[in-house]
Image: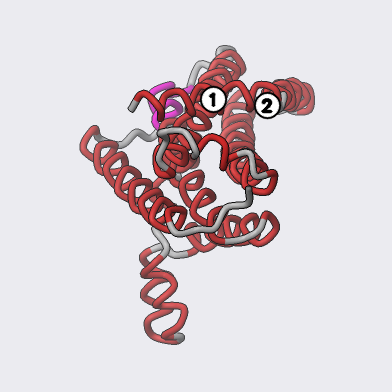
Amino acid sequence: MKHTLQISWIAIRELIYERVFYLLFSFVGLALILGMFLGQLTFGEQAKLTLDFMLGSMQIAMVLFSIFMGISLFQRELQMGSVSMLLSKPISRSSFLIGKYLGQITVQLGVILAMTVVVTLSCLRFEEVHYLAIYQAILLIFLETCVITAVTYFFSVNAGSITAALASFGFFAMGHYTTDSNRKIASESKPLIEIIAAIIPNLEVFNLKTFASYGVTISAREVGLSFTYALVCTVMFLVLAALTFDTKDILT
């Protein structure tokens, strides 16, 4: 555990040096521009469009962060061979991988919290906004981020940077395509798609953006089920990544 936390701290510093906070500044800039363009609409329309845009932008930003920063953080040390120096110490490969993951998730949590403040401030002028619905949607965006980051690490261990990025984006797209209705259609038409849909988790369970726009909340039980689902998916892909990483040849 000590070594894992040390690797996590190193990963946090590396991500800060990557100037990830430019992502936050871009998000704030988009929020300000949106406010200017929506100034002529009614308050009801402004509130819905603002939430749709900002929550959608948050989701996309965190998916891009998960994939590109995850690949950069992990692949760079593999390609440079510097990881072999760390692993020559009493640090297991699984501790290294999980430490990197926890460090990245910690930074992503900080960025999401900062974005949440921006969303809250942007919605203060709207009376009909339901903040609990907004915070539930943001929480599930973070849970989806945890899953996508774990998936990115799995692909990063098994493939090169470009292939890992394409596979991760494909996973994200398929994860939102494989709703229950689409799974049923796939089972009736294309067996291959049915198999793929069965393997890829249904990421639509984390999509509450429309609910937030209309002020609809979900129960604590449903939030708990979403958390459990995200935890199972995350652990599964991290375990698969760790098992593969243990057998991988590393440059020295």
> How many numbered marks does the figure carry?
2
Chief secondary structure of the magenta portion: helix
- Which is more toward the observer, 36 or 175? 175
Indicate left or right for 227 with 72 as reference.
Answer: left
Q: Quadrant of residue 131?
A: top left
Is residue 134 rendered magenta in the image?
yes
- Which is more toward the observer, 155 or 194? 155
* Res 20 label: 2
Q: Residue 226, position in %: x, y?
A: 31, 43
Q: Quadrant of residue 14?
A: top right
Q: Residue 153, position in %: x, y?
A: 51, 48
- Mark 1 Cα-neighbour bin, 10 Å: few <14, some 14–19, many ≥20: some
* Res 107 label: 1
SS class, disc 2: loop
Contact between labelled residues 2 and 1, with CB atoms less than 8 Å apart: yes
Q: Residue 81, position in %: x, y?
A: 65, 44
Q: Amino acid at mark 1?
A: Val
- Which is more toward the observer, 161 or 88? 88
Q: Residue at x 65, y 58 (%)?
A: 160
Is residue 251 rendered magenta in the image?
no
Q: Residue at x 57, y 37 (%)?
A: 85
Compared with 238, 85 (above or below) is above
How far is mark 1 from mark 2, CA to CA?
9 Å
Q: Which residues are magenta?
A: 129-136
SS class, disc 1: helix
User: Which badge, 1 or 2, comes first in the chain's sequence?
Assistant: 2
* Res 132 label: none
Q: Residue at x 69, y 28 (%)?
A: 23
Answer whether residue 25 is visible to the viewer in this image.
yes
Q: Quadrant of residue 57?
A: top right
